[in-house]
Structure formats: C-alpha cells, structure tokens
C-alpha cells in the first residue's frame, strides 16, 4: 500500500473543466448589475423585529440561473451548492462561513420572478443591451414555434393531466404539452419575443404578438400561410413584408428545368436559409440546456421558465459558451 504523504489533504488541485469554463464565460457575459437592479425593488424587506438577514439578490439570481443551465429542481439546487464546489464558487458562497439558501428560499425567489413578470422584463433588458452593442439588428424577424412535452400520465393524486396543456398532432405523431411561439432576429438569430400556449393553438394565430414593431421583413414557414390577411396582423403591422414558405407538396411539383420554376425554387432556398437562423435558438434551448419537457404545472410557470431560458440562450449564443454547456449540462432534466 502506498504511504500517504504529509501533504495529503492540504493540496489544492483544480482542473479547468468544461463546467467551470462555461460558468466563467457566463460570469462575463451576463449583465449581473443591471439584472440585479431590476429585481431589487421587488424583493421583500426585512421584518421590523430583525431576524435572519435576506440573501443578496446576486446570490439568489445566480442560483436561479444555475437551475436553468443544469436542469436543477429547488431541492437539487440546494444540494448541488454543497456537492459541487464550482457552483458555490460561482454563486459567491464560502461554505465554511456562509449559510446556503435552503430550497424554500430558492422556491420563493422563483415565485417572485413569476408573479412580478420579471422574466419578461429581464429578456427585454438583455435584448436592449445586445441591441446597443450591435449584436441585434432588429430589421427583420423570423417567427416559428416548437412543441414542449408535458407528462401525459394520469397516475397521480388527481388522476388527471395538466388542464392547461393540450394534445396536438404533428405529422403522424401525437404530442401532449405546450407550444413556445418565438420571434427571433433574422440577422443574429437571437430571440426577442415569446408566447406560450397550449400545444393545439395554431402557429399563425400568434404571429402578430411575436413582432417588436421595428422590423420591415418577416420570415415564416408554411404553417403561417395567409398570415398577412389576418385582421390582427393588418391592424398592428400593416407595413410588414411577409415571406412565407411554399407548402412542401407544392414545391415538389416545381419543374426546375423551367426558368420560372427554377427561380421560385431558388427563392424558397434563400428563405429557408434565413429561417434556419431562427431554429438556432431552439437548438440551444433543447440540445444545450436540455429543455425538452416542462418542469411545472400550468402555463404561467412554464412560460416564465421558457422566457428565462431564451434570455440565457441569447447570452450564451453571443459567446462560445454553447459548446462548453452542451458537454457540461446533464442529459435528463430533474423535475421540481
């Protein structure tokens, strides 16, 4: 047996893992000061009789973001701060001195963000900062939607599924859950607006709510056919130019040997390449942050989380953090 050295237990060996590298990049790209100033006025003040002082907004916000990046429930987030030194270091806690927020404190902070609609305001703040830095052009928008699954089992106490979710059929496959309708910047692929509905709501009905009003051109897939003729679109965005994809069956009928059909086919290819930039944010959401199934019951809670994830996806997309996060985050989400 190898004899232990006198320095055993006192050596500090730290490797720059992918998880640490991702957190280092997020430390740099997230506007912590601005987000903290946005949330601070809504935080509860300490009671008149004193008691335990409240945790700083910066600590709770960093824990909340760790939950999104690594798919942690409230109890799992508390335990991870004890188990993973990189998490405690990122949050700014010294486990030998500081008290770690318990799961109830983490839950209450999340509920505060939901009740005050601060997730939406954080997204708007981050997008404003990205626009000022020239990373978001805002002259064109890509609208699209993605399905997020919800538990369809009725093996629970109420013997029912989430009443705010719904089922829908896509192709020959049935899905149960919600749908995230997202508007992204056509130049950068960064999300600027989101609407969460039950899964059976048609994409075209939410198109008007995904535009910020400054764009001139909007690109959409074939599911948005006839969007420019809808009453709400004509009332709110009458001067927008819509470029909607041709239905796949109709495009397959094009004869590319004919000059006109060849031009139409090439035009569809150009529109598809622009729409592909809007798909990037879904790739970060589902493949990097592993968000493929809703974590809570009800649309409001899940909408707040999706909005927060899109805001963090925008920040991750502006750096090289996505490659680090895809290896650092777990494959399976932990339900809260």
Image (spheres, grey):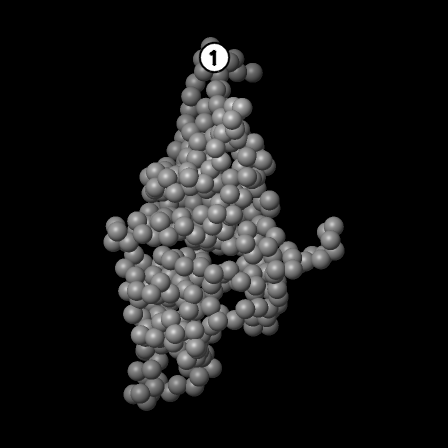
Quadrant showing the N terminus: top right
Quadrant showing the C terminus: top right
| Coordinates of residue 78 in the picture (x, y in percent) | 55, 33
| Coordinates of residue 129 in the picture (x, y in percent) | 30, 49
Residue drawn at 40 percent across, 71 percent down: 220
| Coordinates of residue 321 in the picture (x, y in percent) | 37, 45
Determine the image quadrant of residue 164. bottom right
Residue 309 appearing in the image: no
- Image height of 161 relative to 233, above or below: above
Q: Nearer the viewer, residue 73 or 207?
A: 207
Residue receiving disc 1: 5
- Residue at the far bottom in the pictured view: 258
126 left or right of 298? left
Residue drawn at 35 percent across, 59 percent down: 189
| Coordinates of residue 22 in the picture (x, y in percent) | 40, 40
- Image height of 254 relative to 49, above or below: below
Q: Nearer the viewer, residue 63 or 86?
A: 63
Q: Nearer the viewer, residue 331 or 97?
A: 97
Q: How many marks?
A: 1
Report crowding for label 1: few under 14, some 14 to 19, many 20 or more residues within 10 A (C-alpha): few
Residue 261 appearing in the image: yes
- Image height of 323 relative to 164, above or below: above
- Residue at the far front in the pictured view: 48
Residue drawn at 43 percent across, 69 percent down: 207
Label 1 sits on a secondary structure element that is loop
Residue drawn at 34 percent across, 41 percent down: 34
């Amino acid at each position: 047996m190898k004899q232990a050295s006198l320095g055993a237990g006192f050596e500090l060996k730290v490797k720059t893992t992918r998880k640490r590298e991702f957190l280092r990049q997020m430390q740099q790209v997230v506007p912590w000061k601005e987000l903290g100033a946005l949330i601070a006025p809504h935080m509860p003040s300490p009671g008149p009789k004193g008691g335990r002082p409240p945790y700083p907004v910066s600590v709770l916000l960093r824990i909340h973001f760790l939950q999104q990046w690594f798919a942690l429930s409230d109890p799992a987030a508390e335990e991870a701060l004890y188990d993973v030194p990189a998490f405690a270091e990122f949050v700014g806690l010294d486990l030998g001195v500081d008290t770690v927020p318990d799961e109830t404190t983490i839950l209450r902070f999340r509920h505060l963000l939901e009740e005050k609609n601060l997730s939406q305001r954080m997204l708007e703040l981050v997008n404003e900062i990205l626009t000022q830095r020239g990373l978001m052009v805002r002259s064109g928008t890509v609208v699209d939607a993605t399905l997020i699954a919800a538990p369809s089992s009725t093996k629970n106490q109420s013997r029912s599924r989430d009443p705010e979710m719904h089922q829908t059929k896509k192709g020959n496959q049935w899905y149960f859950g919600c749908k995230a309708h997202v508007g992204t910047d056509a130049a950068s692929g960064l999300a600027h607006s989101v609407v969460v509905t039950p899964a059976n709501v048609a994409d075209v009905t939410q198109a008007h709510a995904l535009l910020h009003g400054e764009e001139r051109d909007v690109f959409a897939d074939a599911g948005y056919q006839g969007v420019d003729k809808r009453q709400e679109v004509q009332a709110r965005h009458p001067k927008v130019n819509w470029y909607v994809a041709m239905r796949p069956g109709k495009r397959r009928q094009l004869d590319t040997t004919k000059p006109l059909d060849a031009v139409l086919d090439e035009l569809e290819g150009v529109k598809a390449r622009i729409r592909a930039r809007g798909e990037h944010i879904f790739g970060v959401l589902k493949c990097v942050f592993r968000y493929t199934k809703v974590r809570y019951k009800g649309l409001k809670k899940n909408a707040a989380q999706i909005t927060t994830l899109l805001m963090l996806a925008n920040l991750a997309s502006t750096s090289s953090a996505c490659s680090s996060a895809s290896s650092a985050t777990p494959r399976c989400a932990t339900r809260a």
